[in-house]
Image: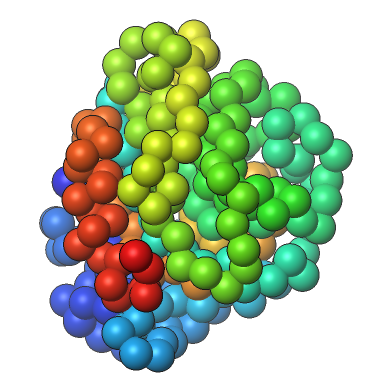
Amino acid sequence: LLYHLDANNVSSYNGSGDWTDLVAGTNNATIEGATWTEGTGDEGYYFAFDGVDDFIELDQYAFDLGTTWSIEIWCKHNSNTESSSSVPYSGNSPSSNNSVVFSSNKSFAASYTSPAVRIGKKNSMYQATAANTQGTILVTDTPLQTWRQIVITKSSGTSTSAIKSYLNGSISASSGNVNVLNDFPTDDTNPCIIGANATNVLQSWWNGNVSIFRVYSSALSATEVQTNYDANKGRYGLS
């Protein structure tokens, strides 16, 4: 585990300041408008994004990944009314239904000329992308206002299973592409953004909530993904 943010852990966030990484304790994420909110029941605290201009920017040197990695995010999409995007998913036309909950590259463009990772929704379908030419992974369609665990893993090589995506502990899709992202850039020109698409200007704003964000230096196995899901599902009323 390289990086871990949890809105319901007071060591990660206590109501003021930055959102602190629980692994190193120094790689802070800067909160720009997102509201720390107390949920109902066992839900605990999370950050709410308004779909207009709220986002969280991770420390530019928070983590440096190599050829294998995993990203896990726990999120809930509340509405399809977020601002539209001028940088479409997978070459499709811009749509008000584009909504990005996490992205890694500020210079990312529709031509996929630079590597990037994005997780979000388009036309009610969760998508997880990790490529510089193609490689979108479609994740099972899910309803609004429901918490979801989304995991995307990258193993070494370019086999047909180099990239895998999971929804709520279960594998959803796998894909291989010789151009899949082998390095995960985090610097002043390639920030990691929660709550928007990190293009040259932030777009495709997330209208929903985020509670947990984790980054690993290895490709999690299906068992490890399921273990993480089982450890947190009760918090969100999932089975």
Q: Is residue 197 left or right of residue 192?
A: right
Q: Is residue 50 left or right of residue 147?
A: right
Residue occupying image coordinates x 49% and y 9%: 178
Name the spot of residue 231 as percent of width and height, x first: 20, 62
Q: Does residue 64 show up?
A: no
Name the spot of residue 183 as percent of width and height, x first: 38, 26
Q: Does residue 129 show up?
A: yes
In terms of image quadrants, where is residue 11?
bottom left
Residue in the foreground of this view, choosing between 31 and 217? 217
Residue in the foreground of this view, choosing between 200 and 67? 67
Name the spot of residue 6 as percent of width and height, x first: 28, 69
In terms of image quadrants, where is residue 67?
top left
Quadrant where the C terminus is found in the figure:
bottom left
Residue occupying image coordinates x 28% and y 56%: 229
Image: 109 above or below 96: above
In terms of image quadrants, where is residue 224?
top left
Image: 158 above or below 213: above
Q: Name the outermost residue toward the front.
A: 239
Residue occupying image coordinates x 62% and y 22%: 134
Q: Is residue 35 left or right of residue 218?
A: right
